[in-house]
Image (cartoon, rainbow, N blue to C red):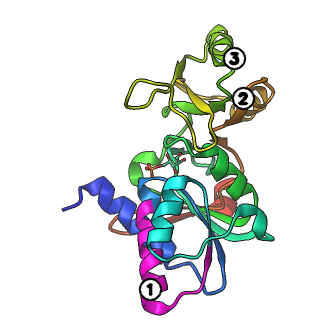
Amino acid sequence: MLDKIQQQKKAAGEYAASLVENGMVVGLGTGSTVRYFVDRLGERVANEGLDIVGVTTSNRTAHQARCLGISLADVDAVDYIDLTVDGADAVDPQLNGIKGGGAALLYEKVVAKNSKRNIWIVDGSKQHAELGHFPLPVEVVSYGEQQLCRLFKKHNLNPILRLDEDGRPLTTDNGNNIIDLHLETIPFPEELATWLSNQVGVVEHGLFLNVCDEVIVGGDEIQVLKREAAKN
Ligand SMILES: O=C[C@H](O)[C@H](O)[C@H](O)COP(=O)(O)O
């Protein structure tokens, strides 16, 4: 029996899977919500002969998709991605968000930037009036990461190097590490994003601004929030 949050994740994932059409190149995000989406896509491939090519954002998702018989292509082997479905850790009313709770932010951003349409699937707990509530992941090269931590501390960004279950610095699929910034709020996300991108040793950050076109919030009734509507 799934708890309420899992039910919402499943509902959002399955709804998003119903939007995928024959012939599409589909970006497959990462995380516990996307897992439901990919499961349902796998069912559609097996039962309906849905003909799609997936572009994955992590080794975990690639493994799941392969096990389900979903054909995959490298991001560089396709002209573009028709639709990417991904999760999010926090979403604000303008459909900006924080991603990378599962350490997949770099490949997720590459796939999102090469997608015609980006949909995020979330449970209700991910919606916030402002970003910052969820720690902001920053992917960094390991060489000099303590120097970056000191710099972030100096700027009151409350950095904590993310550790794996063995207490060692967590390594991303790309061989980097993650520093989480524990911020109460992010009043100026654009400025923070630009500042972070300008720091030597930062590979990517988890602020996804003006990326998402639609958010699907799972629940007894599915809510679909669209960027155009959010702008007005
Ligand atoms: O790095 C991980 C991704 O950004 C996930 O999409 C995000 O953390 C949401 O994951 P979940 O659906 O498990 O809450």
| Amino acid type at mark 3 | Gly
Residue plotted at (78% across, 23% down):
199
Q: Which range of residues does the magenta coloring cover?
A: 35-53
Left or right: residue 153 versus residue 60 is: right
Circle 3 Cα neighbour tier, 10 Å, few/some/many (<14 / 14–19 / ≥20): few
Q: Position of residue 136 (x, y in %)?
A: 57, 32
Give the position of the C terminus as an image quadrant.
Answer: bottom right
Above or below: residue 140 compared with residue 76 = above
Q: Is residue 25 magenta?
A: no
- Mark 3 and mark 1: span between their CA atoms? 47 Å
Residue 144 marker? 3
Question: Which of marks 1 and 3 precedes in the sequence?
Answer: 1
Q: Which residue is mark 1?
A: 46
- Which one is in front, 178 or 134? 178
> Would residue 92 be visible to someone looking at this image?
yes
Q: Give the percent coordinates (x, y) of residue 227.
A: 66, 59
Circles 2, 3 touching at the beta carbon (< 8 Å): no
Q: Looking at the image, which is closer to me, 56 or 4?
A: 56
Q: Disc 3, ligand 1: is the CB inside 8 Å?
A: no
Of callouts 2 and 3, the N-terminal one: 3
In the image, what residue occupies the spot 47% across and 91% down? 48
